[in-house]
Image (cartoon, rainbow, N blue to C red):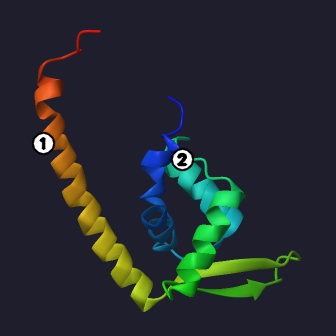
Amino acid sequence: MDGFNSELMRGSLDLMVLSVLANGSNYGYLIQQQLRNVSRQQVDLKAGTLYPVLHRLERDKYLRSKWDESTGRRRKWYELTAAGKKQLRSQAAQWQQYVECIRTILAPVVDLGALPV
């Protein structure tokens, strides 16, 4: 299966990034890799999409960052702040409610099997 529609993903990018960082600090490329791996290749964010999200989350105080050169390469590491953890919990709860709502709405369609063309 190909990746998800970009319009569908747009509303969940913050949640996905915050979720990955809930497991510990990471730099951009590793965040991309984790999203790709956890989603079974269905979420393949490009750098041009990911970094503006990271910068906005940092500006909103949900993330903090620091530069590190200990690996011989200068990388900016991101981690959740207390506000970021709170935001993650809130967004995750909202998305769970949303998913259940969509399942309920789709139940009659799913119960009917394949729709006629």
Question: Which residue position holds label 1?
Answer: 104
Quarter placement of the C terminus:
top left
Q: Where is residue 115 in the image (x, y as percent from the top left)?
A: 23, 15
Q: How many marks?
A: 2
Counting residues from the start of the chain, the first of labels 1 and 2 encountered is 2
**Is 23 or 9 nearer to us in this picture?**
9
**Is 37 or 82 nearer to us in this picture?**
82
- The image quadrant that residue 73 belongs to is bottom right
Residue at image x 47%, y 67%?
14
Callout 2, which amino acid?
A: Val
Q: Where is residue 94 in the image (x, y as percent from the top left)?
A: 25, 65
Question: Which residue position holds label 2?
Answer: 43
Residue at image x 31%, y 66%?
92
Name, please, the residue furthest toward the right. 72
**Separation of residues labelled 1 and 2 (CA atoms):** 25 Å
In-image side of 44 versus 101 (left or right): right
Dot 1: element: helix
Residue at image x 75%, y 86%?
67
Q: Position of residue 11 (x, y in %)?
A: 42, 58
Residue at image x 54%, y 55%?
35
